[in-house]
Image (spheres, rainbow, N blue to C red):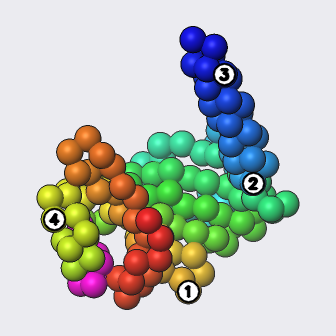
Amino acid sequence: MKSAINFKRLTLIAIGLLLVSVSAFAQEAKIKEKDVPPAVIAAFKSAYPNATVRGYAKESEKGKTFYEIESKDGATMRDLLYNPDGTVAEIEETIAATDLPAEAHQIIKSKYPRGVVSRAEKVTEGNTIKYEVSIRNGKRRTGLVFDADGKLLKK
């Protein structure tokens, strides 16, 4: 009984430390459109005139401030991270699993033969492209990251 209570305490402490470390690395706060710099709004509307905005956020990462716009454009969900001057820092957009590089498909089939790709995203940061994939295998979910060529970067 006493060991179960100690285990629960340690678990809560570990979760608390994890939350503090994550919040120290990147802080995100939901905001309203009026709080987003006009340059960011203009850049978004120019690039994605038919998209519907789902939400806005202000993020701080490593001392830099970014503005995120979550949007939906047809069937594509897109999260855009902008610098305050309206330049794009990062784009995350959903893609069909069939749009993943061939090597990524091979890795997924070999490591997770019964797995189903439940979500695939193309992440563009500057000239760097990577793919983030969520695989469902029964009740178990696994996240994988691939480079532009489909090489596995991390699990």
- The residue under label 3 is which amino acid type? Asn
Q: Tell which circle, 2 or 3, labels the residue nearer the N-terminal end.
A: 3
Distance between the alpha carbons at the discs numbered 4 and 2: 35 Å
Task: Give the residue number, with chain letter if any, for mark 4.
Answer: 113
| Label pair 2/3, CB-CB below 8 angstroms | no
> In percent of the image, x 44 and y 81: which residue is there?
147
Task: Give the residue number, with chain letter if any, for mark 2.
Answer: 25
Q: Tell which circle, 4 or 3, labels the residue nearer the N-terminal end.
A: 3
Task: Give the residue number, with chain letter if any, for mark 1.
Answer: 127
- The residue under label 1 is which amino acid type? Asn
> In percent of the image, x 61 and y 54: which residue is there?
68
* In this rendering, position of residue 116 left or right of residue 142: left
Please tell me the numbered disc located at residue 6.
3
- The residue under label 2 is which amino acid type? Phe
| Label pair 4/3, CB-CB below 8 angstroms | no
Vertical relation: 149 (above or below) 66: below
Near-viewer residue (73 or 125): 125
The part of the chain drawn in magenta is 97-104
Quadrant in which the N terminus is drawn: top right
Distance between the alpha carbons at the discs numbered 1 and 4: 32 Å
Q: Tell which circle, 3 or 1, labels the residue nearer the N-terminal end.
A: 3
Residue 93 at x, y = what percent?
Answer: 41, 63
